[in-house]
Image: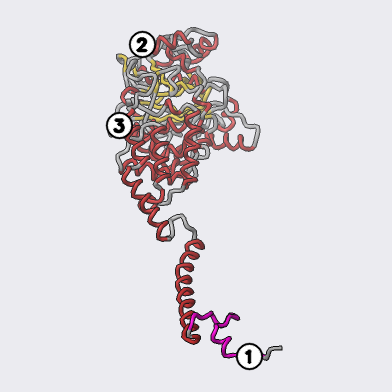
Amino acid sequence: MAKPKAAPKVDASAGGAAAKAPADSVYIGQSIKPESIAEFIYLRLANRHGLITGATGTGKTVTLQGLAEGFSDQGVPVFCADVKGDLSGVAEKGESKPWIEERAKAIGFTPEFRAYPVIFWDLFGEKGLPIRTTVSSMGALLLSRLMDLSEAQEGVLNIAFKIAADEKLPLLNLKNLQTLLEGLAARADTLTTKYGNITKASVGSIQRSLLVLDQQGADHFFGQPVLDIDDLMLKDGKQGYISVLVADKLMESPRLYATFLLFLLSQLFEKMPEVGDPDKPKLVFFFDEAHLLFKDAPKALLEKVEQVVRLIRSKGVGVYFVTQNPLDIPDTVSRQLGNRVQHALRAFSPLEQKAVKAAATTFRANPAFDTEKAIMELGTGEALVSTLDAKGQPSIVQRTLVRPPFSRVGPITDTERNKVIADSPVQGKYPDKPSDSEADQEVLDKWAGGPAEAKAAKADEKDATTRTGGASRSDGFWTTFGKQVVRAVVPAATRMLEQSLKRGTRRGGGGGGFTGFGLTSESDQDDKPNKPKD
């Protein structure tokens, strides 16, 4: 049987059970059965990612809040989404409550109530600083996911992005993209041979999806100035800032929420330099309601998520998914999550029983208890915990009481929030409204309208085609075939008629008729014998 994690160093500055955790770690809580063992995450292994799961009301938010505080105290910046509004309390000092006192006593923990440095962000700019990016930075794949486009429509959108890159056209906000698509539809005939098939039906469907996106408030998200990734990694003295994304309203558009967080992860992956295995993470990213990211996701998107999660570790970023059901996370992603906290699950249906069994199999078994049975018996604030030990191997799972937060448990008031926003270190850097240039839109308007010379040439070509009787590009097969028949048959019929008339004239010697159709010439009348008169 493997030995549980040892505590090689003691952090004497922390009271109670926290003193049993190494100084270079983040304390989670204390296991009390069969023996008291501190559960923690080594800082140097925190970028091996993690998973927090459990049914509603089992304590996931408190666990997330405690971990965010622990990383901040270690000088590690944190980004997390506040889905219900409860997480905003991290910005204010906590206070003693009966359940906090009871939990602290049970694990020998001494709470040190204090507030933490926080920056509030909001895609809508209502309860936090506006957070924006450009359409071109979002990319065709994520934008297609955001609008739930079909494969054909996604292909047209890819063409639009390619043309914007080739023509050096600005693509900052939704209006820019709408104008680009208008020009795409108008030039479909000339662009198809170079870029691929472009149908007006697909363009129209994309435009309709953009309109829906606009009505959901996405126009606040697309534009300039864009979010500076460095502003997510600020410190206040020795503490890392906790960036809280206000997501209660954003959750009304779950696809926008999931796509934005994935985009943010992708930006971190692309822009942050390689650091290998640092002593502690550069940033810890908590992805709450993670099931929204993977639900009905196309294969291309799942591959991108897997790639980002697998490789972003070397950029010094730890990603922690928070969700209710461990089955929400695909196996290709789940196997990369080394630090796990499992709160209680309920198993009333066969599907729920399957989820419990799946969760149990992800842990390294503890002979002291039945893991599968324990998952259904856990109380609020209690969890099964397994993290990576000093050698990077999963530790034996332990039943753990999670330590209470130092900050407020519950939401803050609007007055308190406004004060935090006003004191933000990046206040004034992100205006309430996008500051996009009108000149960029004029460039797109000119491209979509096309040069006057091209329009005139096209009109002249159309007139010439009409005069010569040529087939236009819009003619169907049978129309074109009919025109060709008329052009071939009419001249031949005319020649036949002329030749017949000439032959009749030679026989009759005068202005003849057309024999063979019951008509006779005057000479034919003279050659007939005269009838006697009565």
Q: Disc 1, disc 2: CB below 8 Å? A: no
Q: Which residue is mark 2?
A: 423
Q: Which residue is mark 1?
A: 530
Mark 2 closeness class: few <14, some 14–19, many ≥20 residues within 10 Å: few
Decide which of 230, 95 is in the foreground and name it.
230
Is 161 located above or below residue 261 in the figure?
below
Mark 3 closeness class: few <14, some 14–19, many ≥20 residues within 10 Å: some
Give the spatial CA distance, label 1 vs label 3: 117 Å
Of tags 1 and 3, the one toward the viewer is: 1
Residue bounds of the magenta highlight: 510-531
Which of marks 2 and 1 precedes in the sequence?
Answer: 2
Which of marks 2 and 3 precedes in the sequence?
Answer: 3
Decide which of 392, 172 is in the foreground and name it.
172
Q: Which residue is mark 3?
A: 272
Give the spatial CA distance, label 1 vs label 2: 128 Å
**Residue 500 at x, y = what percent?**
49, 80
